[in-house]
């Protein structure tokens, strides 16, 4: 039992905002944290019509039905009324989930085209002059995650190699250093970002020092 002043906060139910892939990922994680995902994925256990169930089986079935009601309640809170009214079969949480998936995820024929477009976008990504390390990582990881959400296996090392290839020339020295000194297969994306951020901070510091020195020299010349 949580004591007074406990900092524990219940996670918010992810609201469907039209971006199905992102929402379904968040919602699946939310339901897994509640230990309800099995009902969404597999549905309530079905028995043959007329089968005589044991007391334990009846209890387990009632427990599943109660959990399914709770899961449906979460889905009802996550999905707007206008969308829920278009879902004709809402008997179970699996019915609702499957309907949302069919409506918003797209057909199997469309997915290969989506993946092809995402692969092309991924390969064309390059760090723009004036952009920060965080901005470059954000753009690259967004596209990489879209590829994964669409069912493609994309290893971290492929993302790391792409980021290193995409850096602007001023990072050539640190990129070469990382490639020579680290095993990219065992380097995490977070570790790479940390290394590049340190280098970026040093370069920004040097630039500020050079600017301050330039201003100081100009002021000296003016005062002479």
Image: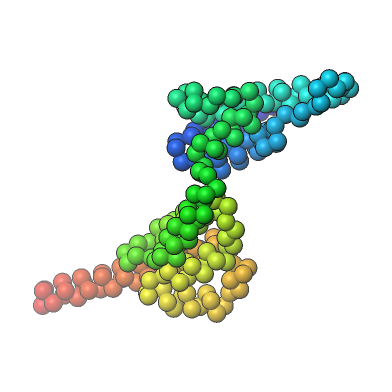
Where 72 sits versus 30, above or below?
Answer: above
| Residue 29 lies in quadrant | top right
Q: Is residue 53 above or below residue 169?
A: above
Q: In the image, is residue 193 above or below residue 111?
A: below
Question: In the picture shown, does residue 23 fall above or below 182?
Answer: above
On screen, residue 95 versus residue 159, left or right, reads: right
Q: At x 32% / y 67%, what residue is drawn?
A: 129
How many numbered discs, if any? 0
Residue 173 at what x, y percent from top left? 44, 78
Residue at image point 44% right, 37% down: 18
Looking at the image, which residue is at 47% across and 70% down? 164
Query: Where does residue 20 sit, x and y in percent of width and height?
Result: 50, 40
Image quarter of residue 206: bottom left
Q: Left or right: where does residue 3 sit relative to residue 106?
A: right
The residue nearer to you, when weighing 31 against 207, is: 31
Which residue does the image show at 52% across and 42% down from the upper left?
105
Q: Quadrant of the N terminus?
A: top right
In the rendered image, is residue 145 in sight? Answer: no
Closer to the camera, 185 or 192?
185
- Image coords of residue 146 (percent x, y): 50, 52
Front-most of residues 107 and 163 = 107
Residue 156 visible in the current orientation: yes
Way the structure is coloured: rainbow
Q: Quadrant of the C terminus?
A: bottom left
Which percent across, then down, holds residue 157?
57, 66
């Amino acid at each position: 039992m949580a004591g007074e002043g406990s900092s524990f906060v219940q996670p918010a139910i992810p609201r469907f905002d039209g971006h199905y892939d992102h929402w379904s990922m968040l919602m699946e994680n939310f339901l897994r944290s509640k230990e309800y995902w099995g009902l969404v994925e597999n549905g309530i256990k079905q028995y043959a019509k007329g089968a005589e169930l044991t007391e334990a089986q009846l209890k387990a079935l009632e427990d599943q039905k109660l959990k399914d009601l709770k899961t449906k309640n979460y889905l009802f809170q996550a999905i707007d009324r206008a969308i829920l009214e278009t879902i004709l079969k809402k008997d179970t949480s699996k019915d609702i989930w499957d309907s949302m998936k069919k409506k918003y995820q797209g057909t199997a024929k469309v997915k290969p085209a989506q993946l092809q477009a995402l692969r092309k976008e991924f390969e064309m990504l390059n760090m723009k002059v004036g952009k920060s390390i965080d901005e470059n990582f954000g753009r690259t990881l967004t596209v990489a995650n879209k590829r994964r959400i669409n069912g493609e296996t994309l290893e971290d090392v492929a993302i790391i190699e792409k980021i290193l290839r995409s850096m602007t020339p001023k990072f050539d020295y640190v990129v070469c250093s990382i490639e020579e000194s680290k095993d990219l297969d065992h380097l995490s994306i977070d570790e790479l970002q940390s290394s590049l951020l340190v280098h970026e901070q040093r370069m920004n510091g040097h630039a500020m020092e050079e600017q301050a020195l330039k201003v100081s020299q100009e002021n000296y010349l003016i005062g002479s």
